[in-house]
Amino acid sequence: MRTCHRENSNRKIDILHLDGLHSEEAVRHDLENWLPKLAPGGLLLLHDVNVHRPDFGAWKAWDELTGRGHAFMFRDGPGLGLWEKPTKSESRFRDLFLEPANNSAAAALAVYYHERSRLNNSHRLSKIA
């Protein structure tokens, strides 16, 4: 990631997925280095935000991020956080995931859980074969 960061130092990122080392220090280091590169309105996917073990710190950083922008968490398994970097104008993120009784959020979750189940089943079958 360091090489990519140096080579593209002037470009903004629209979607960033962080799944690196899991200590609180490492997660904060990644966020400090990469969040400035995320475009306003850009999306951060942060993995393992639902793992509450002493050697994992993503959940602590995630808790802080949720107070600084729109956020949604896929809570199954280790958890995947979806966070939108604040913009000066209103975005559709809130409409898609955060409004109660939202059909778009329900549809997105249904697709996510269906694909996750399909991939888990494929993985199980490949272990048997």
Image: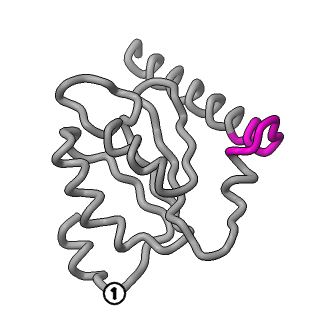
Amino acid found under the numbered disc labelled 1: Asn
| 75 relative to 25 in the view: left or right | right
* Image quadrant occupied by the N terminus: bottom left
The residue under the point 40% across, 47% down is: 46
Residue range (magenta): 98-108
Residue 98 x/y as whole percent: 68, 44
The residue under the point 57% across, 72% down is: 87
Looking at the picture, tell me which residue is in the foreground, 117 or 87. Answer: 87
The quadrant holding residue 101 is top right
Residue 106 x/y as whole percent: 76, 36
**Residue 100, magenta (yes or no):** yes
The residue under the point 75% across, 44% down is: 99
Q: Is residue 82 above or below residue 44?
A: above
**Residue 67, magenta (yes or no):** no
Circle 1: element type: loop
Looking at the picture, tell me which residue is in the foreground, 75 or 71. Answer: 71
